[in-house]
Amino acid sequence: MTEPNAGPTAGPIAGGTGALADPAYREAVVDLLGALAYGEISAFERLAEDAKLAPTTRDKTELVAMASAEFGHFASLRERLNDLGADPFVAMAPFQQAIDSFHAHTAPSTWLEGLVKAYVGDGLAADFYREVAAFLDADTRSLVLETLADTGHSEFAVDRVRAAIEADPKVGGRLALWGRRLMGEALSQAQRVVAERDTLSALLAGGVDRPGMDLAAIGRMFTRITENHTQRMSTLGLQS
Amino acid sequence: MTEPNAGPTAGPIAGGTGALADPAYREAVVDLLGALAYGEISAFERLAEDAKLAPTTRDKTELVAMASAEFGHFASLRERLNDLGADPFVAMAPFQQAIDSFHAHTAPSTWLEGLVKAYVGDGLAADFYREVAAFLDADTRSLVLETLADTGHSEFAVDRVRAAIEADPKVGGRLALWGRRLMGEALSQAQRVVAERDTLSALLAGGVDRPGMDLAAIGRMFTRITENHTQRMSTLGLQS
């Protein structure tokens, strides 16, 4: 089967200019977009599944709206992979196991756990997109930043979670533990992916036309992501 | 909670001009849009669920793309209901039971059954939209026809189903029975809805500014819908 979006550039890695002319960089970008694309399609699946826990059709629609937005992101990433001459599904395959494991280990058992996951997950994804954008060529960066601009569907979760904690403060303690588990699983899967995919570590190390990161800078990046997570938990009324 | 799309016209049924100034017509339009909106949100849910049966991520994305398109339709219908001053979720509620029953009685147990349902269901919905459009005021008709123009994501199903029948002709017999069951359930739930909702029968009967349908015309409408279904089954390589 051929991809509907496959343009005239389809085929084995097409030629490029600028940073993309470097095969190692190009491979890293295909890996990165493949990881993001699989992340989006599985976010769709999880949100659609977690929407079943909604107490009302109105609440359900909020998670369904987020799921549909994730599919929109996926479609943009798939198009970019096709433009780069890569098969999007081949590019996604190496990340399937880690992302599936993350979701298998963090399947919400209540509507509120689903809301916390949607809010925290959306925020972590946005942070991650923002951090990696700095290491990309201008075209790929624009795509990643546009995808980022379209997140933020999860704000409704804040109202619902805060109201539930106000009604029953014990809920807050359980959801705080849940938030910590989400963050732990996300970090452990992310570390596993970076350790296994040399291309991604090379991307972080930079190139002739692109800035790189030393270990101290990587440490600061994790600090920023962790601080944002703490801030989000606090917005939800939860200790992190 | 307030709906994000609720504009200044929100509140109990807002005043209108033309056909919408007639309260009975307006109520019928709210009912019809409510039925379509609940149909879309539950089509999203079923397609997202049936996507789990996909043999590959590539196939899965095809059903996920359809699910996302259904959510887009839902969002347009919800906006129109808000513009009419109706609460979309109140408008949807009377149709929940019939539509949920339809899906409960037609939950696919295999990927191919899911594909046939997606293709046949998409086609039936498009036929139904086209038929009811004739009975609507110009603005509502435009919305319904725009929604219709955005269907047709299900063509990929034809390739997959035909290939499966070619590989194993016995598959065709089972899927033909399945197609008949889908059509039977759709008709019986549709009849139940029209019988229970006087507004919808009144809509079909027409009004001062709008054409109506006598029993013979309703008979011809069912004939057209049945013929299109037969045509679609044949496109899939199935007897109806």
Image (tube, coloured by chain):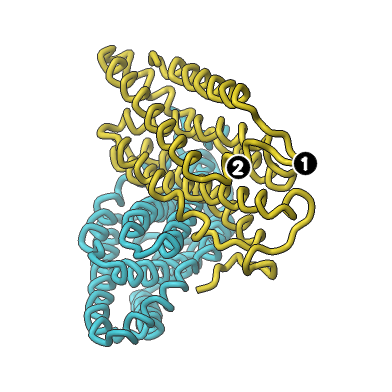
Chain colours: A yellow, B cyan
Give the percent coordinates (x, y) of residue B129: 45, 65
Tag 1 subunit: A
User: Disc 1 residue type?
Assistant: Asp
Disc 1 element: loop
User: For residue B143, which quarter of the picture?
Assistant: bottom right
Q: Is residue A40 left or right of residue B90?
A: right
User: Disc 2 residue type?
Assistant: Thr
Identify which residue is drawn at 48% across, 46% down. A40
Q: Which mark is residue A209?
A: 1
Which is more toward the observer, B186 or B59?
Answer: B59
Which is more toward the observer, A74 or B210?
Answer: A74
Q: Is residue A215 left or right of residue B128?
A: right
Q: Does residue B91 appear anywhere in the picture?
A: no
Disc 2 element: helix
Give the percent coordinates (x, y) of residue A211: 72, 34
Q: Are marks 2 and 1 on the same chain?
A: yes
Give the vertical position of A152 relative to A4 (above or below).
Answer: above
Camera-near label (2 vs 1) is 1
User: For residue A213, which quarter of the picture?
Assistant: top right
Identify which residue is drawn at 39% across, 71% down. B119
Identify which residue is drawn at 46% across, 35% down. A191
Q: Mark 2 touching mark 1, by CB under 8 A?
A: no
In space, the residues marked 2 and 1 are separated at their CA atoms by 23 Å
Q: Is residue B164 left or right of residue B101?
A: right
Q: Residues within 10 Å of mark 2 (few under 14, many from 20)?
A: some
Give the vertical position of A191 relative to A69 (above or below).
Answer: above
Q: Which mark is residue A218?
A: none
Mark 2 sits on what residue?
Answer: A147
Give the percent coordinates (x, y) of residue B231: 40, 84
